[in-house]
Every structure is written in structure tokens, then in C-alpha cells.
Image (tube, rainbow, N blue to C red):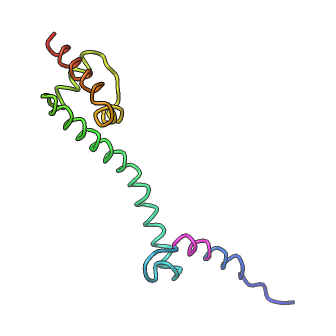
């Protein structure tokens, strides 16, 4: 009776890893042990950076809103404080989009914030 060898299962498992590491540099793409480590590290970075991406976009939106507010003679923090007092609930992504695409609507929000700060 022929001896059973773990041929195809082993090969399939390794092929799955090396197919996921296509495009990596050097041995990281084809040497199994190195590719396995590289893939694990890539997964860690991907998991971490999905969270970092949210932070980075929020910072970008705030910077854009701040620039648009200063063009209207107001700071970002006073603008947000005024919107909160006026009970205007709009997220920073939408505010940033308004500041870029619809300056008139953004000016209205700034005037609303200024009016609520005076009261």
C-alpha cells in the first residue's frame, strides 16, 4: 500500500498564503515563512489603519471648516459652539462639504451661529 503524504493540503495552504502576498517585495512574496509573517503584519496594519483613516478624515474636515469659518471672520470652535447653542445638528463631513460646494448655505450657518452666540 502506498504511503500517504500530506501533499495537496500542504500545497494548497501554502499557495493560499503566497497568492495573497502577490506584489510584495523580495522574499515576502514567495518564501512561505516570510510571506506568512508579512501577511500577518499586513493584516495588523490594515486593521489599525481602518481606525486611523476615520481620525484623519475628521481632522481634514475640521481643517476645511476652520478655513471656511475664518474666511467669514469666525473661528472653528466659536462656530461649533454657536451651532450647538442654536441646536443645529449637522456632522463635520456635511459641514466640510457645504463649505466647499455651497458657500451661501455655509454663510447662512455662520450667521445662525453668530446670532445664537449673541443671545
Say whether residue 97 is magenta: no
Q: Nearer the viewer, residue 113 or 43?
A: 113
Task: Report the number of discs.
Answer: 0
Of all residues, the one furthest to the bottom in this rendering is: 2
109 to 98, vertically: above or below: above
Of all residues, the one furthest to the right in this rendering is: 1
Q: Which quadrant of the figure contains the N terminus? A: bottom right
Majority secondary structure of magenta residues: helix
Name the residue at 53% across, 80% down.
Answer: 32
| Residue 73 found in image quarter | top left
Q: Position of residue 85 (x, y in %)?
A: 24, 16
Q: Position of residue 45 (x, y in %)?
A: 40, 60
59 to 27, vertically: above or below: above
Q: Which quadrant of the figure contains the C terminus? A: top left
69 to 44, vertically: above or below: above
Q: Position of residue 41 (x, y in %)?
A: 43, 66
Classify residue 111 as left or right of residue 26: left
Classify residue 53 as left or right of residue 110: right
Classify residue 40 as left or right of residue 60: right
| Residue 38 found in image quarter | bottom left
Q: Nearer the viewer, residue 12 or 2?
A: 12
Q: Look at the image and give the residue range highlighted in magenta.
A: 15-21
Q: Nearer the viewer, residue 118 or 32?
A: 118
Q: Position of residue 76 (x, y in %)?
A: 19, 32
Name the residue at 83% across, 90% down.
Answer: 2
Of all residues, the one furthest to the top in this rendering is: 119
| Residue 15 found in image quarter | bottom right
Amino acid at each position: 500500500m502506498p504511503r500517504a503524504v500530506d501533499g495537496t493540503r500542504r500545497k494548497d495552504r501554502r499557495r493560499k498564503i503566497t497568492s495573497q502576498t502577490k506584489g510584495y517585495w523580495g522574499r515576502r512574496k514567495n518564501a512561505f515563512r516570510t510571506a506568512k509573517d508579512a501577511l500577518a503584519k499586513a493584516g495588523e496594519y490594515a486593521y489599525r489603519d481602518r481606525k486611523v483613516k476615520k481620525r484623519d478624515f475628521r481632522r481634514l474636515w475640521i481643517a476645511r471648516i476652520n478655513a471656511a469659518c475664518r474666511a467669514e471672520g469666525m473661528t472653528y470652535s466659536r462656530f461649533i459652539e454657536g451651532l450647538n447653542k442654536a441646536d443645529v445638528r449637522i456632522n463635520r463631513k456635511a459641514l466640510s462639504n457645504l463649505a466647499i460646494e455651497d458657500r451661501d448655505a455655509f454663510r447662512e450657518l455662520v450667521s445662525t451661529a453668530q446670532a445664537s452666540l449673541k443671545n
